[in-house]
Image: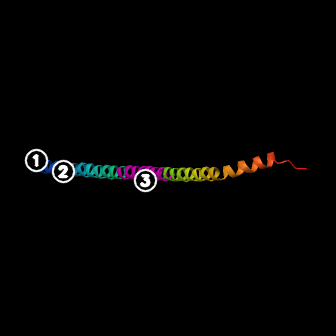
Amino acid sequence: MDALRSGQGGIQMLLTAEQEAQHIISSARNLRMARLKQAKDEAEQEMALYRSNMEADHQNRKSQINSDFIAKQLEAETQIKIQNLKESASRVSPDVVAMLLNHVTTIKN
């Protein structure tokens, strides 16, 4: 009987050890799954932040390019207007000088 009890006690110890091992394995799996989920969430947050930064940088560059383009376009238009004014002034300049000389040299009573 003692042998039977010690055999059953050994089996019971093995069953208990197996349950503990299964519990440890289950806990390790749960921890692993939780860590994988946490790592995935962190990666998604980093990707969202990176995407947001890249989009903002792209918009800034696009805005800068537009600003540079507009500035160059305004500069070109300004130069054209200045050139037109110079041409117009050079055409009327002799007439204005003649008119001024006429008024200055004419004596009125």
Q: Residues within 10 Å of mark 3 (few under 14, many from 20)?
A: few
User: Circle 2 is placed at which residue position?
Assistant: 18
Residue at screen point 9% across, 51% down:
4
Give the numbered dot on residue 55: 3
Q: Nearer the viewer, residue 15 or 7?
A: 15
Q: Residue 27, position in %: x, y? A: 28, 50
Predominant SS along the magenta part: helix
Q: Earlier in the sequence, mark 2 or mark 1?
A: 1
- The magenta segment is 43-66
Q: Gap in Å between the C-alphas at discs 2 and 1?
A: 24 Å
Mark 1: amino acid? Asp
Q: Residues within 10 Å of mark 1 (few under 14, many from 20)?
A: few
Is the residue under label 1 in contact with that under label 2 (CB below 8 Å)?
no
Is the residue under label 3 in contact with that under label 1 (CB below 8 Å)?
no
Mark 2: amino acid? Glu
Residue at screen point 85% across, 47% down:
107
Is 45 on the left-hand or right-hand side of 1? right
Q: Nearer the viewer, residue 19 or 87?
A: 87
Q: Earlier in the sequence, mark 2 or mark 3?
A: 2
Q: Secondary structure at mark 1?
A: helix
Q: Secondary structure at mark 3?
A: helix
User: Circle 1 is placed at which residue position?
Assistant: 2
Mark 3: amino acid? Glu
Q: Nearer the viewer, residue 10 or 3?
A: 10
Q: Residue 38, position in %: x, y? A: 35, 50
Q: Nearer the viewer, residue 22 or 79?
A: 79
Image depth: mark 1 or mark 3 in front: 3
